[in-house]
């Protein structure tokens, strides 16, 4: 398999239809019932921290960050991260996450939360949230609740809600 050189740029409003199609393909209709999706519902993602990965003119992947609150602290929720099945396992998802985290850090953001697989996200700077530290307003596998500390310090504590 030939290496791919991705172009990663900020998401534009005109990308929304392609991003929605990617998310539908990656997660199906069940995505609307997931707790993370419901937290993001009605909260616009951060336009300056949401990226697409392109191959030529085709949007091959997308990563969004959405403002949230964890207790009294502001943070970001990563997701959805979606990559077209055609380009899975080619490094685009990791490149999008790295780009988003770097941009968030430059804007002074301190924490990024997600529900995901530790073996995938751990090398990107995420760690499992200690049990009982953060709660979500719906069902979630707490072994998959991960946080990236962009500036070090303590992990916020409390209930997650949209900002």
Image: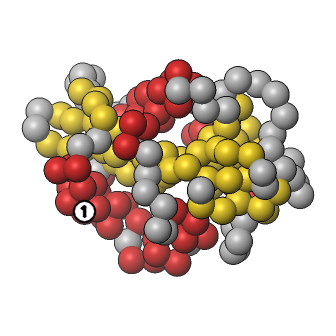
Q: Which quarter of the figure is the N terminus placed in?
A: top left
Q: Residue at x 89, y 58 (%)?
A: 132
Establish if 19 lies above or below 28: above
Foreground of the two, 37 or 14 = 14
Q: Residue at x 48, y 45 (%)?
A: 65
* Residue 105 spot, x, y in % from top left: 57, 25
Find residue 36 and report its image quarter: bottom right
In the image, farthest residue toward the right: 132
Residue named by callout 1: 21
Asked if residue 139 lies left or right of residue 60, the reply is right
Q: Which quarter of the figure is the C terminus placed in?
A: bottom right
Foreground of the two, 8 or 121 = 8
* Residue 62 spot, x, y in % from top left: 34, 45
Using a 10 Å C-alpha cutoff, classify the residue at mark 1 as few (fewer than 14 neighbours), some (14 to 19) or many (20 or more): few
Find residue 119 and report its image quarter: top right
Foreground of the two, 46 or 86 = 46
Secondary element type, mark 1: helix
* Residue 2 spot, x, y in % from top left: 23, 25
Establish if 31 lies above or below 159: below
């Amino acid at each position: 398999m030939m290496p791919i050189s991705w172009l990663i740029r900020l998401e534009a409003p005109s990308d929304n239809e392609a991003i929605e199609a990617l998310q539908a393909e990656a997660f199906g209709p069940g995505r609307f019932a997931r707790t993370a999706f419901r937290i993001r519902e009605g909260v616009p993602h951060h336009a300056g921290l949401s990226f697409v990965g392109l191959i030529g003119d085709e949007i091959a992947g997308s990563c969004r960050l959405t403002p949230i609150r964890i207790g009294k602290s502001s943070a970001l929720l990563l997701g959805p991260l979606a990559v077209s099945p055609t380009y899975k396992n080619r490094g685009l998802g990791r490149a999008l996450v790295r780009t988003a985290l770097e941009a968030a850090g430059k804007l002074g953001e301190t924490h990024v939360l997600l529900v995901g697989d530790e073996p995938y996200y751990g090398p990107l700077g995420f760690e499992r949230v200690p049990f009982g530290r953060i709660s979500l307003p719906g069902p979630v596998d707490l072994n998959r609740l991960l946080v990236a500390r962009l500036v070090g310090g303590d992990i916020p504590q409390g209930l997650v809600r949209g900002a």
